[in-house]
Image: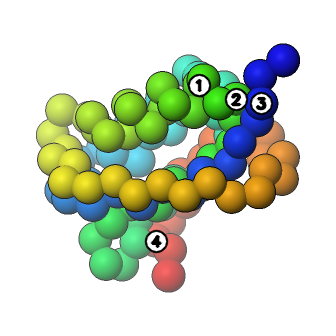
Amino acid sequence: MQENIRLRILVSGRVQGVMFRKYAEKLAQDLGITGHVQNLLDGRVEVVCEGGRENMERFVEGVRKGPRLARVKGINSEQQEHTGEWKDFTIREFGF
């Protein structure tokens, strides 16, 4: 059985207003990852998500690439304690 992990990912670059959140939502749903994605007021996008290690690695690589119109300049991820709190993956409004 695959180990479940939780990541907080901060993505910088041209990642707001270019369908990045919708792209992350679809990718997460395709990989069976739960959590959320939201724009931050400083121009970055935050993703907090949980899933199996292999699918999470695929997800991070997809986020690093981004959708066609995005220009990802940087990605910072940190592993957190897995909680199993989500049943699906959602788009949230601006975070603070």
The spot of residue 79 in percent (x, y) is 62, 54
Residue 13, compared with residue 64, is above or below; it is below
At 19% from the left and 54% from the top, the residue drawn is 73
**Mark 1–mark 2 CB contact (< 8 Å):** yes
The amino acid type found where label 2 is placed reads: Gly
**Mark 3, residue position:** 3
Quote the CA–CA distance across marks 4 and 1: 26 Å
Residue 44, compared with residue 4, is above or below; it is below
**Mark 3–mark 2 CB contact (< 8 Å):** yes
Quote the CA–CA distance across marks 3 and 2: 6 Å
**Mark 2, residue position:** 52
- Left or right relative to 33: residue 42: left
Res 92 → quadrant: bottom right
Depth check, front residue: 7 or 40: 7
**Mark 4, residue position:** 94
Of callouts 4 and 1, the N-terminal one: 1
At 78% from the left and 50% from the top, the residue drawn is 82
| Circle 4 SS class | strand
